[in-house]
Image (cartoon, helix red, strand yellow):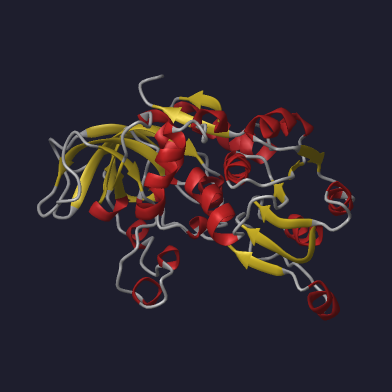
Amino acid sequence: MRGTPVVRAVVLPAPGAPLELGEIELPEPGPGRVRVRLAAAGVCHSDLSLSNGTLRQPVPAVLGHEGAGTVTAVGEGVTAVSPGQRVVLNWAPSCGACPFCARLGEPWLCTEANAASGVPYARAADGTELHPGLGTAAFAEETVVAERGVLPLPDGVPLVDAALLGCAVLTGYGAVHHSARVREGESVAVFGVGGVGLAVIQSARIAGAGAIVAVDVSPEKEELARRAGATDFLTASDTTAREIRGITGELGADAAIECVGRAETIRAAWSSTRRGGRTSVVGIGGKDTRVSFSPLEIFHFARTLSGCVYGNCVPERDLPVLAAHVRAGRLDLGALVTDRIGLDGVPAAFEAMLAGRGGRALVVFGQE
């Protein structure tokens, strides 16, 4: 691959192995492909799940799936974008042909959305083939993705902060508006105040929710939650569901959105809602834990429990809506970010997520 452009990237050698910062050889885009110079990339809990094997990812791989940047080159046949255009990476592009896309109208469940993650896209310095994490590989100065893997960024949105639109904000906004379908005046309980949880809180405020109760294991998250729009904050405990019922007139929340992915948190979110309430699970947990419900309580409470993939969003439809909220000042992307780092800060950002510290860490290229 002599003459192939070389860029810096964070590589996962194997599940559970330490991340490695080094140079990779990135080819020019082939037919239907787009090369993007990254301005920023968010560090998402899903990246941590990919790194530890909770989610499957062929390795070695360049992780990172939440990013924004500028198109530098396009391959033959690409018509959606052109060099110089600002774009947001789309880690779950729908194929338009599978049953979920064509017949069921649920493109966020597309069977081919992450197919690119299994196809090598670059090489390490020693010639080893590398896979793109979730088909995106945003923990690198540049990446090459399919044409469907980029979305034109609407005007009026800062390019660096726009990285958050690619996952955290689309997921949080969609969880509120498409999954839980929060209506004006309803009460909402938000479990987990990380990047996605903060986006959920802001989106609940935009939806006109009444009480917005944020819950986290870390009491230090209260200031972040209240700045995002939470009316109440609780440190997670065995009495959380009871406390939420107290805040909501003993009924329970109309909707609960779980952003953690732990069995006990899902159970607490379910228990915190009123009879007929709605719980949406955004967090990704392991396959070896179980959440239990009795048949009697399912009947008696008549609650709804549903999974929520990518906020049940259609990025092409929802991204312009989010951009309008940003331009109007209703959505503050910068408020989700607690750490701006370089590529060499990604391992520490993973440790912070494990420890439950902070909101979103954002890799800003050129900062190092």
Q: Is residue 333 left or right of residue 233?
A: left
Q: Which of 92 and 201 lies nearest the eye of the viewer?
A: 201
Q: Is 62 left or right of 124, judged from the image as shown?
A: right
At 81% across and 71% down in the image, what residue appears? 301
169 relative to 213 in the view: left or right: left
Quadrant of the image occupied by residue 229: top right
Q: Residue at x 85, y 79 (%)?
A: 296
Q: Is residue 41 above or below residue 250?
A: above
Relative to 152, is 4 on the left or the right? Answer: left
Kindly indicate the quadrant of the structure image that contains residue 26.
top left
Quarter of the image with the C terminus in it = top left
Q: Is residue 125 visible?
A: no
Residue 225 in the image: above or below residue 300: above
Between residue 67 and residue 222, name the one nearer to us: 222
* Residue 92 seen anywhere in this rendered image of the structure: yes
Q: Position of residue 194 (x, y in %)?
A: 63, 39
Which is nearer the eye, 70 or 353? 70
- Residue 103, horizontal then vertical, whole percent: 37, 78
Residue found at the far front of this picture: 184
Residue pictured at 65% horizontal, 40% vertical: 354
The furthest residue to the left: 76
Q: Position of residue 235 (x, y in %)?
A: 81, 40
**How many numbered badges does the structure rendering display?**
0
Q: At which x and y percent is residue 183?
A: 63, 55
Residue at the spot 55% in from the left edge and 48% down from the top edge: 172
